[in-house]
Image: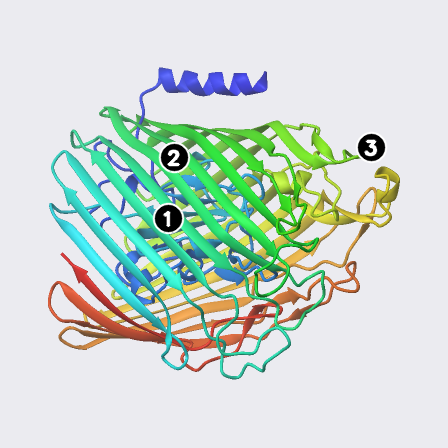
Amino acid sequence: MRHITCLAATLALVLAAPAYAQSDEAQPAEDTGASTDGTFTLGQIVVTARPPEGLQIGGETLKADAIYTFNRNTLDDAANLIPGVTAGNSGGSRNERLLFVRGFDRFQVPLSIDGIRIYLPADNRLDFGRFLTPDIAELQVAKGYASVLDGPGAMGGAVNLVTRKPTKEIEAEVRGTLNLGRDAEYTGYNVFALLGTKHDQWYAQASYARNFQDHWDLPGSFKPTVNENGGERDFSRTEDWRVNVKAGFTPNATDEYAISYTKQEGSKNAPLHITDTSNASLHNWSWPYWNIEGVYFLSTTALSDTATVKTRAYWNKYKNLLSSWDNRLQNSQALPRAFNSPYDDTAYGGSAELAVKLAERDTLSVAFHYRHDEHTESQTSRPGFTTPTFEPVQTSEERTWSAAIENRFAFTPALSMTVGASYDWRDTDRAEEFGVPLGQTGANRLFSFPLRNASGWNAQGRLEWVQGATALHASVSSRIRFPTLFERFSSQFGTALPNPNLKPERATNFEVGGSHSFGPIRLEGALFYSHLTDALVSVIRTDAPLLIPGVTTPLNQRQNIGSADYYGGEISLSVQLTQAFQAGVNYSYIHRTFDVGTPAIGTIRNFKLTDVPSHKGFAYLSWQPLGGLKVTPNLEFASGRTTVTPVTANANNPFYYQTGGYVTAGLRADYDINDYLTIGVGGRNLFDKYYVLTDGFPEQGRSFFASVRAKY
């Protein structure tokens, strides 16, 4: 009943009121979000910091120029340039690249492409290394404060990839990069091509990006181990490509309607832990395919001089296959640990956002989001054996809703306040599993878990003062995120006890910050604090043998008993002395503490937060000594981070330790042959630094690249 009431209230606002376009700053109703830099503004989300210019690295935004100059061809690598954002490595056999936003992980920070969320309904274990950046005009990262108008799930922030849009009658670009290893040997390539056209009332564009990695090289100081002999990193081969086709209709100065189709396909292997040989940790896994496909419709329509409505609708398809092999040759699947596990997921939904300019300084916005997820999985165990075991298809279905309202009021031309609230709810319609239901005996069979719905409120506020070259702000935001199907229902290969009653986690985020320009110098910074409640903790259920006949050992179970505190600060400095000289540096500090709490039943295993360094930064110079030559050296640095050894002899008391910090140097030199053609060379980790982000998985050593770029 409460869901119907919320929906009715939202529809009443939609029907009763005119609307007005809402963004991070007040804008006239006739503004359609048109962009002159090739950014597809219909696909943007709300970020509060000023977008950077050219090569600058903003507090929340990274433009295509910086992504290209620093040769950051995947999402994790590009986002790592932004202060407060940390790239990581999942370790283990999944070979996933991670992102942390002020300490919040991939489950707590949603990822979108053009404002459409990318969500894997089973476990949302997104691999950020699979998302390519050459066709991206802008990378947005909302940190802590993510507008409720943009949808549910942004407990710790939001990441959005904004694609490109044509800006002239004929627009074309072709780009190719040859990647080389420590000794300048071939390691792979990436290519990109774009063709677009823009006219008074319509535009169209198609782009293609491909990244192929034959292998990457370990640093020269690496000492061979039982699992890795050095040189070329074993099982580091990956392949990804993406195509995007977009067409838009702009009938007048205020309205825009666009439809976009995106398809990306990938495959990857998984390097092994360099020293661990235990059966519990040594998996020979590969992903023969990891694919995403989607169709999106986006629009903005001015209903009157003071009203605008924005809509988004989408259909997404996600498919991947995980294969487990008997050995490192990956040529046999006959042992009990071998399997093929395909996922086939579908999502569809949409959103509507309306805004009303109630007065000259008062804007009210409402938004409604709906999403339907369907996940199907199955497994073939020992597919290479004479009698393989086949599981039936298991299906799970969920619907997620969000109704939001936000008001922006300007007290004076310089001082404004934004307050917002939303109500999110999730209905679980189906949750199937193949096995033996809890507390029962007998043969494996298809059954359904108990279905539980969940809901929660979000609220936020932001005060902003902008006067000339100075901007100051203070904000507070309290947001939830719903646990995934995996967290609630997965048995994790017989080691976990499901918990359908898990509640949403919540984070309350506080921030104060500002920016100021001193002529050619711009300074930007923020202090932040986040408090987490109802955080998920893995509890050891020693009573598991009493609950499940035949079980003789304790099992893990996730429970909402944890709390945490994250706090720190960020600062960025950029300098544009002349057209030929630019420099910048950013630094972020974060400290995290976690209280695991006390479970009603069970005990707590040894647990610490991992993967996020206390100190992290990036610095660069861009110098154009003559004509078309530009040289850009850079440094990336981070302190050590906590990591954990594999689960071996004592699973209840894992060993945590600090990795070493690192400083890596990079360099790029580009030469403009003419207005249309540029060639470039460069390198990463030039001093071949050996470092690890997670136990047992060293990062890439020295590498080089050579590129050519043609633009029209």
Position of the N terminus, as image quadrant, is: top right
Three-letter amino acid code at the position of disc 3: Gln
How far across and down, in percent of the image, does residue 467 sit? 31, 50
Q: Nearer the viewer, residue 326 or 158?
A: 326
Whole-angstrom CA distance, mark 2 to mark 3, is 56 Å
Left or right? Give the position of 647 relative to 5. right
Q: Earlier in the sequence, mark 2 or mark 3?
A: 2
Badge 2 is on which residue?
408
Left or right? Give the position of 690 relative to 150. right
How far across and down, in percent of the image, does residue 123 sit? 58, 44
Left or right? Give the position of 531 relative to 204. right
How far across and down, in percent of the image, does residue 7 sit? 49, 19
Three-letter amino acid code at the position of disc 1: Leu
Badge 1 is on which residue?
161
Residue that extends furthest to the right in the rendered view of this protein: 546
Badge 3 is on which residue?
440
Q: Earlier in the sequence, mark 1 or mark 3?
A: 1
Rendered image quadrant of residue 16 = top left
Question: What scheme was used to colour the molecule?
Answer: rainbow
Image point (77%, 56%), residue name: 605
Label 2 neighbourhood size at 10 Å, few (<14), some (14-19), many (20+)? many
Image point (41%, 53%), residue name: 131
Which secondary structure, mark 1? strand
Task: Please say if the residues under marks 1 and 2 sit with CB atoms less than 8 Å apart.
Answer: no
Three-letter amino acid code at the position of disc 2: Arg
Left or right? Give the position of 5 relative to 602. left
